[in-house]
Structure formats: C-alpha cells, structure tokens
Amino acid sequence: MPAFQLLLPREFSLLFLQFSFPALLDAGVPVTLASDDPPLFGTDLVTEYARCMDTFGWSEARVRRVVRTGIEHSFAP
C-alpha cells in the first residue's frame, strides 16, 4: 500500500484511490510518484513503485510509463 494511504485519514486515501489516481492514469493525465519526505513517510521511491504494483496491480510496463512521465515533466535539463 502506498505510504500516503498509511498516514492520511482513511476516508481521504480511499477516495483518492477510487476516483483520482487510477482514473487520472487511465485518462492519460501525466501522473508520477515522488518521495519528497522519506524520513517522514519511512519510504523511498523504489518502495513506492513496488507498493503501487502490489496495490493497483501495475505491470512493469505501467511502472516504466509512470517513471518516464516523471522524467519528461521534470525541470531537469
């Protein structure tokens, strides 16, 4: 289960899962994962991708697409 689900109120995290994240991805909206505060959430980016694979049933191809989206939409030169 992604870290946000473990730390946010249950009602919010369930709503987010059901109506936001999967729907945005399926609609082609650029969505990516981040681990902006690893000490607070006790996680890292690799763990978050693994959790999404387990929670949402992501394939390796979907993980690669989400990673690619993060690179393409970053401010990296």
Image (cartoon, helix red, strand yellow):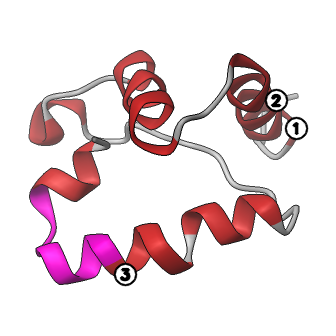
- Residue 72: mark in rendering: 1
Q: Residue sitting at 32 percent across and 43 percent down? A: 2
Foreground label between 1 and 3: 3
Quarter of the image where the C terminus is located? top right
* N-term mark: 3 or 2: 3
Give the alpha-carbon distance from disc 3 to disc 2, as whole Å: 26 Å
Mark 1 and mark 2 in contact? Answer it, CB < 8 Å. yes
Callout 1 environment at 10 Å: few (<14), some (14 to 19), or many (20+)? few
Quadrant in the rendering for residue 44: top left
Location of residue 21 in the rendering, given as x and y in whole percent from the top left corner: 57, 64
Q: Amino acid at mark 2?
A: Arg
Q: Is residue 46 above or below residue 14?
A: above
The amino acid type of the residue labelled 3 equals: Leu
Q: Which residue is mark 3?
A: 15
- Label 2 element class: helix
Residue name at image x 37 percent, y 81 percent: 15
